[in-house]
Image (cartoon, grey):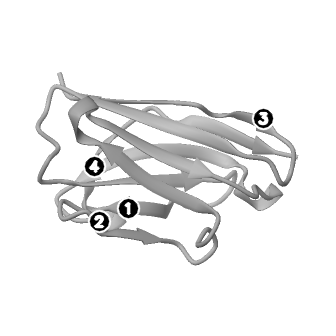
Amino acid sequence: HVQLVESGGGSVQAGGSLRLSCVGSGYDFSMHCMGWFRQAPGKEREGVATIDPYGISRYADSVKGRFTISQDTSKNTLYLEMNSLDVSDTAVYYCGAGRYCSLSYITIWGQGTQVTVS
């Protein structure tokens, strides 16, 4: 059973920090792009940060310098460190995996975790 399970979301004041975690199981994700995506109310899902099988990370312009994606392959865990959070970062954050890092190629999704910045 292929599964991605996110945790670490919550409510925080603007300027604060959160760390999201995503644990993968039931599948070999080593040759997949892993990433964080988010969807705000009334908006389409968008890419936040991805890391490809070669360890190259990419970020949306809106989060560069504030968010950091990392992974611990020994624990099948993906992380997103979020600092200097802004109200505009409020969204449901999803962990995803796919053959490539483009949103359209992400085929495995977690259930999402809510991040609310006030």
Figure quadrant of residue 83: bottom right
Q: Are marks 4 and 2 in contact (CB under 8 Å)?
A: no
Q: What distance separates the C-alpha of mark 4 from that of mark 1?
A: 9 Å
Q: Position of residue 99 (x, y in %)?
A: 16, 59
Q: Residue at the spot x=18%, y=59% of the render? A: 53
Q: Are marks 3 and 1 in contact (CB under 8 Å)?
A: no
Q: Callout 3, which amino acid?
A: Ser
- As drawn, the label of residue 11 is 3
First reached walking from the N terminus: tag 2 or tag 1:
1
Q: Are marks 2 and 1 in contact (CB under 8 Å)?
A: yes
Q: What distance separates the C-alpha of mark 4 from that of mark 3?
A: 26 Å
- As drawn, the label of residue 50 is 1
Left or right: 88 as drawn, with respect to 96: right
Q: Position of residue 50 (x, y in %)?
A: 38, 61
Identify the secondary structure beneath mark 2: loop
Q: Callout 1, which amino acid?
A: Thr
Q: Residue at the spot x=86%, y=52% of the render? A: 14
Left or right: 58 as drawn, with respect to 115: left
First reached walking from the N terminus: tag 2 or tag 3:
3
Identify the secondary structure beneath mark 3: strand
First reached walking from the N terminus: tag 3 or tag 1:
3
Choose between 13 and 92: the one closer to the eye. Answer: 13
Q: Residue at the spot x=38%, y=54% of the render? A: 35
Q: Residue at the spot x=64%, y=36% of the render? A: 114
Q: Which residue is mark 4?
A: 97
Q: What distance separates the C-alpha of mark 3 from that of mark 1?
A: 23 Å
Q: Callout 4, which amino acid?
A: Ala
Q: Nearer the viewer, mark 4 or mark 1?
A: 1
Q: Position of residue 108 (x, y in %)?
A: 27, 43
Q: What distance separates the C-alpha of mark 2 from that of mark 1?
A: 6 Å
Q: What distance separates the C-alpha of mark 2 from that of mark 3?
A: 28 Å
- As drawn, the label of residue 101 is 2
